[in-house]
Amino acid sequence: MNSSFNTGLNLKIVSLHDMIIILNMQRGLRRQEDKPFKVVFTNGCFDLIHRGHVDYLSKARDLGDLLIVGLNSDDSVRRLKGEKRPISNQDSRAMVLAAFTFVDYVVVFDEDTPINLIRSLKPDILVKGGDYSHDNVVGADFVESYGGRLELIPLVPGESTTNLIKKIEQ
C-alpha cells in the first residue's frame, strides 16, 4: 500500500489473517454483550467505481453490522476480465473502497473466486448483484449450511464498468 495515504484508510485494508483476528474479537465482544452481530460479505473487481457500486455497497452494509469487501487482486482481475483489465491497480481500488463509510474492511485476494475468504470468514450474509442467481454465487451453499443467507441486490440499470469503458473508448 502506498504510504503517502496516511489517512487511517489503510487500517481498513487488511490481510485475511488480520481480518479473522478482527472478526473473532468483534464476535467475542458481541457475545459478551449478548448483542446480535451480522457480518456481511461481498466481493468483486470494483475496477472503475460508479453509481451502481455505491448503491450496491451501501445496500449491502444496511443488511448487517459489518461489511467486508473481498477485492480481486490485479492478477485475478486479468484472469477473469482479460489483459486490458484492471484499469486501476489493486492498491488504488482498495483505497477507494476503504474511503466509503459503509465499507468496514477490504481484503484483497488472488484466487479466481472468493471461496477461501468465505470459508475463513463465515459471514452471516453473502451479497451479490441481481445479475446473479443462487446457483451461480460461489459460497452460497456453504453460507447457508451454517444458517447464513444469500442476498441478491438489484443492479442500477445501465451502470456498469463495461459500459463506462465503452463510453471512454468511443
Image (cartoon, helix red, strand yellow):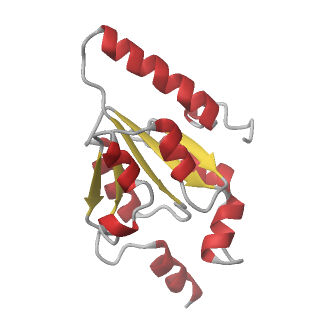
The residue nearer to you, when weighing 46 against 77, is 77
With respect to residue 34, does 17 lie above or below? Answer: below
With respect to residue 139, does 77 lie above or below? Answer: below
- Residue 1, visible in the rendered structure: yes
What is the number of callouts on the image? 0
Residue at the (63%, 66%) spot, across then down = 77
Instruction: Judge from the rendering whether residue 102 lies leftward or rightward of residue 11; answer left or right.
Output: left
For the C terminus, which image quadrant? bottom right
Place residue 82 in its image quadrant. bottom right
With respect to residue 144, does 13 lie above or below? Answer: above
For the N terminus, which image quadrant? top right
Name the spot of residue 138 as percent of width and height, x first: 45, 60
- Residue 14, visible in the rendered structure: no
Name the spot of residue 102 as percent of width and height, x first: 37, 40
Place residue 122 in its image quadrant. top left
Name the spot of residue 155 as percent of width and height, x first: 30, 68
Instruction: Judge from the rendering whether residue 163 lies leftward or rightward of residue 128; answer left or right.
Output: right
The residue nearer to you, when weighing 89 against 24, is 24
Instruction: Judge from the rendering whether residue 13 lies leftward or rightward of residue 97; answer left or right.
Output: right
Place residue 137 in its image quadrant. bottom left
Residue at the (37%, 73%) spot, across then down = 159
Residue at the (32%, 8%) spot, across then down = 32
Name the spot of residue 134 as percent of width and height, x first: 31, 64
The residue nearer to you, when weighing 161 against 18, is 18
